[in-house]
Image (cartoon, rainbow, N blue to C red):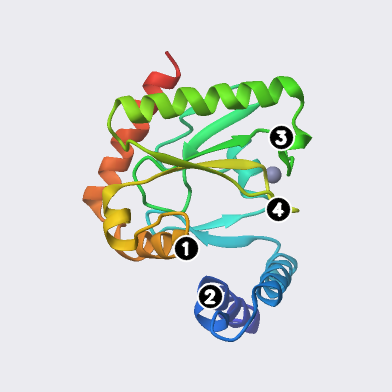
Amino acid sequence: MYISDILYNIIFILQNNFDIFFNAFMIKTIKNYFAKLLKCVIISFEGYMKIIDLTGKEVEVKNCLGCDIANGNLDVFGGLLYRSENFSIAQDFELPIDGFLIIFSNRHVEKLNDLNTDEQVELIKLISKTLNILQNNQIADEYNIILEEKSSYHFHIWLMPRHRWMIEKFGKVLKNLKEIQDYAVKNMKTTENLEKIRQTCELVKTQLNK
Ligand SMILES: [Zn+2]
């Protein structure tokens, strides 16, 4: 094994256990700063990032996850559920949560206001149509619609279902989002759950493209 491989693996482990290493003693601003710094180091070191997808598979992301998926350079679990000229929809790339979908712009923008008015209108219609499908098929009754704008992040909206298990285990979903995500990653990459997610993807894909 080359030294660069060893170094890379150390950075990779640090990256994937970042919160465990730093949560206890770093305030949020410093933590975010180091998270960005670490990301830059990883990209400049190898020219790509590695992330773990919802099945547990290690995936190399060369530029931007959103751009790579929108441009067809990266396969996503369940496939692209929908693609128009401006937006694409897919199951969340990393979290094995049924009905947890992402709507993202095809071009690389960062903020809602980087979209023109027509795109903003299309986006709202897409959110509404997708939620209708998910709710009519009892994937979940209620959703959080989350838009987190971050510099250098590809514009995307999460449709986050509020499943009963989340409420029973964690109470308020938005307040405990991180814990729910960590729980899903650790406990829900089962064959049965992945199959359920795949079925939901098929259903949403069929109905979105009618
Ligand atoms: Zn992008």
Mark 3 Cβ inside 8 Å of ligand 1? yes
Give the residue at mark 4: 150
Q: Which residue is mark 3?
A: 107
| Earlier sequence position, callout 2 versus callout 3 | 2
Q: Are marks 4 and 1 in contact (CB under 8 Å)?
A: no
Asked if the residues shown at circle 3 and circle 4 are in contact, with their CB atoms under 8 angstroms apart, the answer is no
Q: Is residue 99 above or below residue 152?
A: above
Q: Nearer the viewer, residue 133 or 47?
A: 133
Q: From the image, tell me which residue sits under label 2.
A: 19
Q: The C terminus is located in which quarter? A: top left
* Quarter of the figure with residue 14: bottom right
Answer above or below: position of 3 versus 86: below
Which badge, 4 or 2, is on the more N-terminal residue?
2
List the residue tagged with mark 1: 178
Between marks 1 and 3 in the image, the one whose residue lies nearer the viewer: 1
The residue sitting at the left extreme is: 192
**Label 3, label 4: how many angstroms apart (C-alpha)?**
16 Å
Q: CA distance from mark 4 to mark 2?
A: 19 Å
The image position of residue 101, as x and y in percent, is 46, 40
Amino acid at circle 3 = Arg
Q: Is residue 141 visible?
A: yes
Q: Are marks 1 and 2 in contact (CB under 8 Å)?
A: yes
Q: Residue at x 37, y 40 (%)?
A: 99
The amino acid sitting under disc 4 is Lys
The vertical placement of 68 against 191, above or below, is above
Q: CA distance from mark 1 to mark 3?
A: 28 Å
Q: Give SS at disc 1.
A: helix
Q: For label 4, count other residues whose C-alpha is less than 10 Å away and answer few (under 14), some (14-19) or many (20+).
A: few
For the N terminus, the quadrant is bottom right
> What residue type is disc 1 on?
Lys
Q: Which mark is residue 170?
A: none
Tell me, yes or no, whether the two marked residues, 2 and 3, touch with CB atoms within 8 Å.
no
